[in-house]
Amino acid sequence: MREENPSSIKKAKIVVGIPSFNEADSIAYVVKKVDEGLEKYFKNYQKVIINSDNNSPDGTGQVFLQTKTKTPKIYISPSSTICGKGNNLFNFFLKIKELGAEMAMTVDADLKSITPEWVKCLLGSVEKGYNFITPLYYRHKFDASITNHLCFPLIYGLLGYN
């Protein structure tokens, strides 16, 4: 796996992951909002923002690393041709374990609705002892059609949970 860790981070209590592929046009906004949230609500914690990318040819990784933040950043990308969001998340989870993190969250690289308060709400709940938190937010009716029309009915059908 290719890794760029400009601040040589070896340990972090909080890790925020941003999986991506060809998100150069949108990732900087998300990184800035995550950084604002971490600095405002978790200032005294060891923390890092990780971009788990798929060797994006549009320069997503460079945009991520060049975005000015107070929170250190790490860029990771597979060295093989294995790609996809699942692989990005798998590599992110491996990095969480390696860093010994106690709290972690992920957000998409193309979010337009993210605010610093998302970080407070998601990580604050983990800090209070919750094991898993998922956001409820407004989105366009055509966003997440796979989630709405495949994943949700499948999980509901298999597990019976709504």
Image (spheres, grey):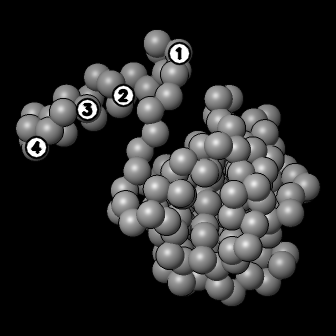
Q: Which residue is mark 2?
A: 146
How crowded is the residue under tag 3: few (<14 C-alpha within 10 Å), some, or many (20+)? some
Report whether 146 appears left or right of 55: left
Q: Residue 59: in sight, yes or no?
A: no
Measure the alpha-carbon separation of dots 4 and 2: 18 Å
Query: What's the residue at 78%, 76% (across, down)?
Result: 5
Of tags 4 and 2, the one toward the viewer is: 4
> What element does badge 1 sit on?
loop
Residue that lies at the very extreme toward the front in this rendered image: 128
| Nearer to me, 42 or 88 | 42
Q: Which mark is residue 159?
A: 4
Q: Are marks 3 and 4 in contact (CB under 8 Å)?
A: no
What amino acid is labelled 1 in the image? His
Label 1 or label 3, whichever comes before in sequence order: 1
| In this picture, residue 59 sits left or right of residue 113 | right
Precedes in sequence: disc 4 or disc 2: 2
* Residue 32 appearing in the image: yes
Q: Amino acid at mark 3?
A: Phe
Which one is earlier in the sequence, the residue at label 2 or at label 1?
1
Label whose residue precedes the other's in the sequence (2 or 3)? 2
Which residue is tagged 1? 140
Among numbered discs 3 and 4, the one appearing first in the sequence: 3
Q: Relative to 101, say whether 35 is above or below.
A: above
The residue where tag 3 is placed is 152
| Quadrant of the rendered image containing residue 131 | bottom left
Q: Nearer the viewer, mark 2 or mark 1?
A: 1
